Amino acid sequence: MKVVLQAFISLSLILLPLSAKSQEPAYESIEDTTALIQEEQPKKIGLIRRIIRGFDRLDTAYIEPQHYLFTVMLQGTYTYDYYTLRSGIRDGQSISFANDGMVKLGPYVGWKWFFGGYAFTLGHSTYDKTKTEIDLSLYSSQIGIDLFYRRTGSDYKLRNVHIKDQDQHQRFEDLPFDGLKVGVAGADLYYIFNHGHFSYPAAFAQSTCQKISCGSWLAGIGFTHNSLDFDYDKLQKLLDEHIPEQEVKLDSGFMFKKAEYYNIGISGGYAYNWVFAKNWLLSGSGQVAVAYKQSKGKTEEKGEEQRFSLTKISPYFIGRFGLVYNNTKWYAGLSAIVHSNYYLESRFATNNTFGSMNLYVGYNFGLKKKYKDKK
């Protein structure tokens, strides 16, 4: 059984209380604001601390802050990865690869801003032990950060094969192929414009509760590094074995051993939290980005190794979806995040879609002093 460490840190719990000198009493931070009442002459705080505290200012008429210091949670996670190679943007050969996905289950514990635990791989004993998956999300009312690092194993299967102007996927469906290894690492930083009324943590970190339906425009920047190791000789051998009645040769766009591409992009999008019943929230967001991509790789032509380098402006997409029940003490929900990266060139094109889905249930305890006083 493989053990994978996952960490999810809610930035909304990290940030410090709202400055006691705030001139907007309708707003408060997620941390205690008892000092607003107790101190007749508030202490002065530095500019940096005021800026940090300001990241989590929110309108309590729209958003209920976290009431508790501790939490325990049980979460199941399903991760997936789908990769498509094309020998050109149009009228070329197209082959898609995907693994069976991975299911993990584990307990998590949290105290204030610390939140982490272990997830145990369930099911298939044939999972490639070289796989590595790390996902870290940081959410505050005003900003969010997604960090990801993935190294796939060699347990891909062919899912869709289109060659010779006809669809051949039935001959290759679920056929194992160990000649492809993919790596992706990157980060996305985004700004939430309507952060006082709209809460990302309510949908994806369970550290606040959205009380009134609301949406917000988003803007962000991102960086991604992709690597691709591809054994086209193995793929050619599979074609020869499963289409013996005709000679099929891979297009020259597939004739490479290794490729790397980097992209830096800017994104824009919209997110909406729909409070359709008391303590219930349905959330969805989408961001479309335009990225500058640069690639380099190795190919073999006439028995000699050659290098190639390409640059291009290409799109990518980020989607997030969540369904949550949260009465401040108990919470449960389902969430998903999807990344889809495209690289389009006349020589070859790729699309890598990957993400994860989480099913969880948790319990908060250790009431904060502010809320004890109210009782």
Image: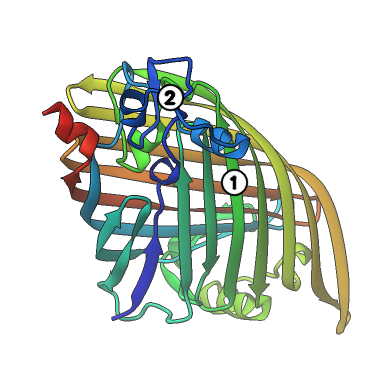
What residue type is disc 2 on?
Gln
Q: Quadrant of the C terminus?
A: top left
Crowding at label 2, few (<14), some or many (≥20) Cα neighbours within 10 Å?
Answer: few
Q: Earlier in the sequence, mark 2 or mark 1?
A: 2
Q: What number is the disc on residue 188? A: 1
Residue extending farthest to the front is 41
Numbered tag placed on residue 41 in the rendering: 2
- Quarter where residue 52 is shown: top right
Task: Return the residue nearer the eye: 4 or 311.
Answer: 4
Q: Is residue 190 above or below residue 262?
A: above
Crowding at mark 1 (Cα within 10 Å: few <14, some 14-19, many 20+): many
Q: Residue at x 31, y 27 (%)?
A: 38
Say if 342 sits above or below 296 in the image: above
- Residue 1, compared with residue 315, is above or below; it is below
* Kind of residue at disc 1: Asp
Answer left or right for 201 relative to 345: left
Q: Is residue 157 visible?
A: no
Element at badge 2? loop
For the N terminus, which image quadrant?
A: bottom left
Residue appearing at x 39%, y 55% in the figure: 8
Judged from the image, the secondary structure of the residue bearing numbered disc 1 is strand
Residue 131: percent from the left, percent from the top? 47, 75
In this view, which residue lies farthest toward the bottom?
303
Q: CA distance from mark 2 to mark 1?
A: 41 Å
